[in-house]
Image (spheres, rainbow, N blue to C red):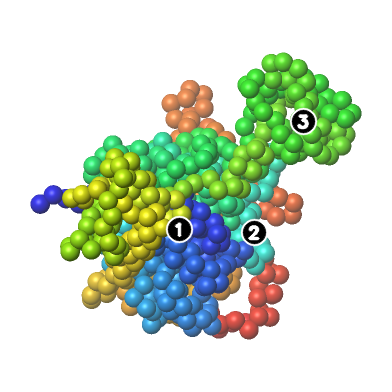
Amino acid sequence: MALLPHQIELLAPARDADIGIEAVNHGADAVYIGGPSFGARAAADNPVSEIERLVKHAHRFHARVFVTLNTILRDDELEPARRLVHELWNAGVDALIIQDMGLLELDLPPIELHASTQCDIRTPEKARFLQDVGLSQLVLARELTLEQIAAVRAATDSARSTLEFFIHGALCVAYSGQCYISEAHTGRSANRGDCSQACRLPYQVLDAQGRFVAHDKHVLSMKDNNQSANLEALIDAGIRSFKIEGRYKDMGYVKNITAHYRGLLDGLLEARTDLARASDGRCRFSFTPDPNQNFNRAFTDYFVRGRQADIGAFDTPKNAGQPVGWVTQATTEFFEFEADDPTLELHNGDGLCYFDAQQELMGAQINRAERAGPNGLWRAWPKDPMSSLRDLRRGTRIHRNRDMAWVRALEKKSAERRIGVWMRLSETPHAEGLSLLLTDEAGHEARAELPLPYAAPRDDAPAAEALRAQLARLGETIFEPIDITLDLPRPWFAPPSQLNRLRRDAIAALEAARAAAWTRPLRAAPVEPPVAYPEDTLSYLANVYNHKARDFYARHGVKLIAAAFESHEEEGEVSLMITKHCVRYSLSLCPKQAKGVTGVQGTVRAEPLTLQHGNERLTLRFDCKPCEMHVVGRLKPRVRAAARELPLQFYRTRPSR
């Protein structure tokens, strides 16, 4: 028996329903979006009614909608979360993305469950466990290599769990779910969707003797993820769902990046018969997708191909854009620059920027731009006074980080997604009218009939073409004709108004047939008896914040279960962040880098470093065996004191004080 092709899913983010709808229109097979609460993005909540609107649009293309419910929950939040899940199920949502295992202990509808990135899936053992407790889609840690991904696939069952991987967008430097700096310093928990982004701050880096190693560098800030060159390798390693980061991103970002990966994946689908789309319809775009046009901190493919030295955005966490030219002169009112490309077009409102003498990124939004001569010479009047543009002088490299023509193009309609149909027009069985049969590219069929007395046309050939032209008018629908067959034993004349009605009835019937054929996958049954968790002891790193989560792990064989860091039971210094990124390696201070180097080998040791930002100090400790870095610190007393004032209910291992 022939094997069915592997379905490849492009999973796009949505800050709101309108962005989600455009993600579908630009080629997403699935969309993930936050609900009204508990969605791990405090500023990206959506009412259930809006999610239902997105669901109805997505399901027309048999695309799916996943809702993030991936914060860790207090005891007093479990019941509201349970009620919300039932509302989402009734709204037609296809799956929930979760982190908190306490949800598995609640009375939920049979909705499919996916493991959030916050579950920190790095090992085959943990992936297998999450599959065996009933999670059907597992997003793997961004830090995994192709070989590690393949090992996870080998340890799990492709019929029971789909592997998902982030392919684009901002990178958290920490293993997801393993960062507590925000909670420790501000009381804002990253595991509850309120991260203060300490990783994007500038730091002084000091060695064990207190000497400066780096000055005002964003050493915890990563470049942005871009796996454009690795898609086929990821497929071969076992990835089937390709996830774009960005539930805070704007419409233009989602349109552009979704279209970019849609094109790349379609190229692979065309070349390989073992792969298939996960939803229906093909997209046409009115623009050429280009990831460089959106906010980015330059790109990296991170650890997919192994450890790389240049993965950090250490100079700035901002968007430097693309280099476009060199300043030729700067006056008190304007500056001129010569473009690298003489065909460059500059627009009023464009964003230009440059690095000053201290390598700080300076912005220069353009109020007015004019050509100043041949060969790409431009004169730009900035919005801000020239006196405020520090170190802008002849020889300065100019970048563009916002192209207003591009922005305006994506504010308009920029894509069409259509499902191909075969159309066959024939006489009704008793020759008392016309029958139109539609068959879409997924094999769904629908028929409509038009009672109509036979009328012969004046001229056979033009009449046949007129019939085809009238039937082909599918412009306001989600369909487009692949082929139109006239299966008529004799030439027919039909008034255009009657053919329009026949076509509309057939399209409505096909939409109804597609809707009837769509079924949501249900929650997978957990393995019985309950499988054992890979470890019998859990530290605060397991993020157990409610008693139901504690009960879940106990039921799966865990003997000692610590409370989440948010419970504030960790008294001294602990790891506030665990990361595969290594500051020593990035600054060429890694002992492994010194191996074999005469005069250097043996002199470099993985001693701790110190990060300092203002009055805040953190210690970097290096665990060289797994090649990981720990950012060590402690909970601020003011955070602990403020939390004591709140009447909250959550899991503790000892009485509160």
* Residue displayed at 33% across by 41% down: 462
Q: Quadrant of residue 156?
A: bottom left
Dot 2 or dot 3, earlier in sequence? 2
Q: Could you say where residue 4 lies in the image, as x and y percent from the top left? A: 20, 51
Q: Is residue 19 above or below residue 55?
A: above
Q: Which residue is mark 2?
A: 196
Q: Are marks 1 and 3 in contact (CB under 8 Å)?
A: no
Q: Secondary structure at mark 2?
A: loop
Q: Which mark is residue 31?
A: 1
Distance from disc 1 to disc 3, alpha carbons, whole Å, reads: 39 Å
Q: Secondary structure at mark 3?
A: strand
Residue neighbourhood size for the residue with mark 3, other residues' Cα within 10 Å, grouped as few (<14), some (14–19), many (≥20): many
Q: Could you say where residue 593 lies in the image, as x and y percent from the top left? A: 47, 32
Q: Nearer the viewer, residue 524 or 120?
A: 524
Q: Secondary structure at mark 1?
A: strand
Distance from disc 2 to disc 3, alpha carbons, whole Å, reads: 37 Å
* Residue displayed at 51% across by 24% down: 599
**Across the whole image, how many numbered discs are drawn on residues?**
3
Say which amino acid is labelled 3: Ala
Say which amino acid is labelled 2: Ser
Q: Is residue 358 above or below residue 21?
A: above
Dot 2 or dot 1, earlier in sequence? 1
Q: Could you say where residue 472 lies in the image, as x and y percent from the top left? A: 37, 48
Q: Which mark is residue 369?
A: 3
Q: Could you say where residue 61 lies in the image, as x and y percent from the top left? A: 38, 57
Distance from disc 2 to disc 1, alpha carbons, whole Å, reads: 26 Å
Q: Are marks 2 and 3 in contact (CB under 8 Å)?
A: no
* Residue displayed at 23% across by 44% down: 274
Name the side, left or right, on which 56 lies relative to 44: left
Q: Is residue 592 above or below residue 541?
A: above
Q: Nearer the viewer, mark 1 or mark 3?
A: 3
